[in-house]
Amino acid sequence: MTPSPVSDAGPPVSPKDTFVTVYGRKPVLEALRDPALAVDKVILAEGADREAVRTFTEAARARGLVLQRATAQRVKVLAGNGRQDQGVLADVVAPRMRPVEHFLTDLDPAAPARVLVLDGLTNPANVGMILRSATGAGLEGVLVPRRGVPAIDPLVIKASAGVAFHAPVLRSRTAATGLAALAEAGFVLFGLDGAARESLFGAELPERVALVVGGETDGLTDDVRDELHGTLTIPLAEGVESLNAACAATVACFELARRRT
């Protein structure tokens, strides 16, 4: 099964912007046994034990797939994780994942839109929780750059409680390049910053807005700050200096949702 292109316009879509790669025996079996997921292919390393071959052959056949074999090194490369792949991976179709350029091409020029952008996060659990919050808040997109943020892997998927497969993920090379594309399409870009003077809750936000969540330790990167139109803070009481990145993102997501109701 190969998903049809999201749009005929824009650059070609890389498979990395179409599938979520799941690795490890338990996550792959869970994906194969979940009827809500569309699995494109399953690859098992040569030299796997007989029980693994039988288990994954049967699970793949039940989904109408032929189990593919590859060298253990090839599986490690494809999984992008040489220590935890356990010799097996599956590519799961992510129906709402696409390059940010395709999202903008398909977006009605007159339509409002809200996008959350991840910049410099390092904790996969935070990425997963943010994807869950943004999807639950009904945001049109979550920009997850290919560089500077953890890949959408089993750790992210687990933290999202499986929502990562269906989240409206937008891809770009970096957060800064994705923001530049959004700005060109009329989005106003704000970064969440504890040192900002204006509150997120009191700010006048346009109908097309992107909010950026920075890294857990260093906050917004310099490249991203150069793209922003301004910064906003989430006001805190009782001497609390900051929120966890996932908590701050959740507050921001539902503030955007509140303004649309």
Image (cartoon, helix red, strand yellow):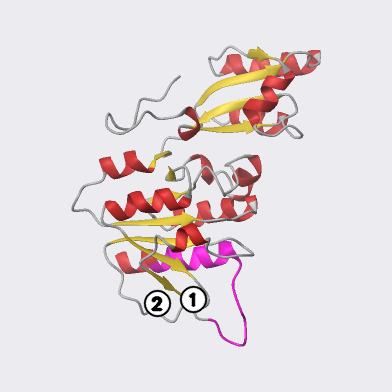
- In the figure, is residue 82 to the left or right of 110? right
Going by the picture, which residue comes out furthest to the bottom?
238
Which quadrant of the structure image shows residue 157?
top right
On the image, the x and y values in percent for residue 180 come to 36, 52
Residue at horizontal 44%, vertical 53%?
Answer: 176
Look at the picture and state if 141 lies above or below 35. below
On the image, the x and y values in percent for residue 18 come to 45, 32
Q: Quadrant of the C terminus?
A: bottom left
Does residue 230 belong to the magenta stretch? no
Residue on which the image places disc 2: 201
Q: Are marks 1 and 2 in contact (CB under 8 Å)?
A: yes
**Whole-Å distance between the Cαs marked 1 and 2?**
8 Å
Q: Give the range drawn in magenta.
A: 236-255
On the image, the x and y values in percent for residue 126 come to 60, 56
Does residue 241 belong to the magenta stretch? yes
**Closest to the observer, 54 or 114:** 114
On the image, the x and y values in percent for residue 149 come to 57, 49
**Closest to the observer, 47 or 58:** 47
- In the figure, is residue 198 to the left or right of 59? left
Please name the amino acid that badge 1 sits on.
Ile
Residue at horizontal 44%, vertical 66%?
Answer: 191
Q: Label 2, secondary structure: give it.
A: loop
Please name the amino acid that badge 2 sits on.
Phe
Residue at horizontal 50%, vertical 81%?
Answer: 235
Which mark identifies residue 234? 1
